[in-house]
Image (cartoon, rainbow, N blue to C red):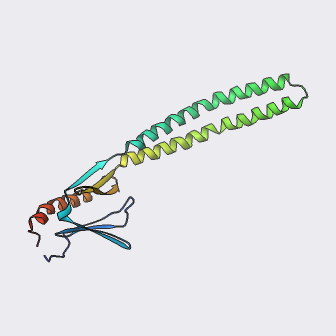
């Protein structure tokens, strides 16, 4: 094996870094995408961390949207019947005054808005389902830790190939520090 032959490669297939490639050599890790390249000397790394994580904010938003969907869905029919009964009462006691006609028209518009609560509830429930799916998928992150900072490479879902790549990088760290890499 030559000095510049790659030990491992990983193509990032999802997330913000989609389309870029991580390549491990004996003494360096190269992150390359489109028109740019980043080289990380392995001797500068303090540690390598790989983690599967789920974003709890997505779960919280999904639960909030689900509660909103339930409130909208269950309040639509009572609101419609209440507004219809108010409009019927106004029509029953109404004379030929324009104010009564305006009130009946306003109540009719409010009844129409109350009918829109069910489709809004369906949209909110769909958004909640999408957020729950993204929460469940989670993400796998490779994090390179330096003395004062760290660099993360996240991908969507549980990714065993990124885990294997991280293990290969971690196995290469002692060799790069002891001078055995050459």
The total of numbered circles placed on residues is 0
Q: Is residue 27 visible?
A: yes
Using the image as rendered, state which of residue 115 and residue 96 is in the foreground.
96
Residue 25 vs residue 90: left or right?
left
> Looking at this rendering, what residue extends furthest in the right direction?
96
Residue 167 vs residue 85: left or right?
left
The quadrant of the image that shows the C terminus is bottom left
- Which residue is rendered at x = 86% and y = 25% of the image? 94
- Residue 7's spot in the image, x, y percent? 18, 69
Quadrant of res 98: top right
Compared with residue 19, is residue 145 higher up or lower down, i.e. above or below?
above
- Which residue is rendered at x = 34% and y = 46% of the image? 54
Residue 170 vs residue 82: left or right?
left
- Residue 96's spot in the image, x, y percent? 91, 28
The quadrant of the image that shows the N terminus is bottom left
- Which residue is rendered at x = 82% and y = 33% of the image? 102
Residue 162 vs residue 13: left or right?
left
Q: Is residue 159 visible?
A: no
- Which residue is rendered at x = 80% and y = 35% of the image? 105
- Residue 150's spot in the image, x, y percent? 28, 56
Quadrant of res 10: bottom left
- Residue 121's spot in the image, x, y percent? 57, 39
Quadrant of res 103: top right
């Amino acid at each position: 094996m030559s000095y510049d032959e790659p030990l491992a490669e990983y193509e990032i297939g999802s997330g913000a870094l989609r389309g870029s490639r991580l390549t491990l050599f004996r003494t360096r890790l190269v992150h390359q995408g489109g028109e740019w390249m980043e080289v990380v000397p392995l001797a500068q790394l303090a540690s390598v961390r790989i983690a599967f994580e789920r974003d709890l904010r997505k779960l919280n938003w999904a639960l909030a949207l689900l509660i909103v969907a339930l409130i909208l869905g269950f309040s639509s029919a009572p609101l419609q019947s209440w507004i219809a009964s108010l409009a019927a009462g106004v029509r029953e006691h109404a004379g030929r005054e324009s104010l009564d006609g305006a009130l009946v028209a306003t109540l009719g518009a409010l009844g129409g808005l109350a009918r829109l609560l069910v489709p809004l509830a369906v949209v909110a429930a769909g958004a909640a389902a999408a957020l729950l799916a993204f929460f469940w998928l989670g993400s796998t992150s490779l994090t390179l830790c330096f003395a004062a900072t760290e660099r993360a490479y996240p991908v969507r879902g549980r990714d065993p190939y990124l885990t294997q790549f991280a293990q290969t990088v971690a196995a290469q760290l002692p060799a790069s520090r002891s001078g055995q890499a050459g």
